[in-house]
Image (tube, rainbow, N blue to C red):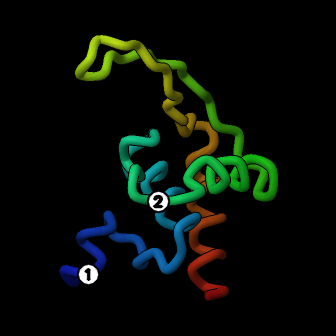
Amino acid sequence: MNNQTDIFGGYPQPKTNIQEVLLTLITNGKTSFFDFSYMQGYRTRVSNLTLTYGLNLETEKKTKENKFGNQYTYHVHILPDTEKEKAIAIYNKMVKNE
């Protein structure tokens, strides 16, 4: 395996934002806004994975405090083990069609 695929856990390099979000779910098992704070439309990508591609993600609501002591909530999207093979097939199809 070359260094390029080592970075991505042995999977082909993502070429779009939705591929990047999906690959993070596959390799890490979960993702949140904190993984993609630079990405406009992160929530839309997660929504597309569930609505368009039929991926069943679990969602966990988390609460944190900012530096001023104010609480805020965010969601962690979790890829269940039962959906991992489906997610890999979707990812490989996405990358192949690019």
| Above or below, comparing residue 62 to residue 94 in the picture | above
Observer-side mark, 1 or 2, equals 2
Q: Give the crowd class for mark 2: few <14, some 14-19, many >=20 residues within 10 Å.
A: few
| Above or below, comparing residue 12 to residue 19 in the picture | below
Q: Residue furthest front?
A: 68
Q: Residue at x 58, y 64 (%)?
A: 18
Q: How far apart are marks 1 and 2 (CA)?
A: 22 Å
Q: What residue type is labelled 1?
A: Gln
Residue 75 screen position, x and y as percent: 53, 29
Question: Label 2 belongs to which residue?
Answer: 39
Q: Nearer the viewer, residue 6 or 75?
A: 75
Residue 46 screen position, x and y as percent: 63, 49
Question: Label 1 belongs to which residue?
Answer: 4
Location of residue 12 by image quarter:
bottom left
In screen coordinates, is 74 left or right of 64? right
Residue 11 screen position, x and y as percent: 40, 71
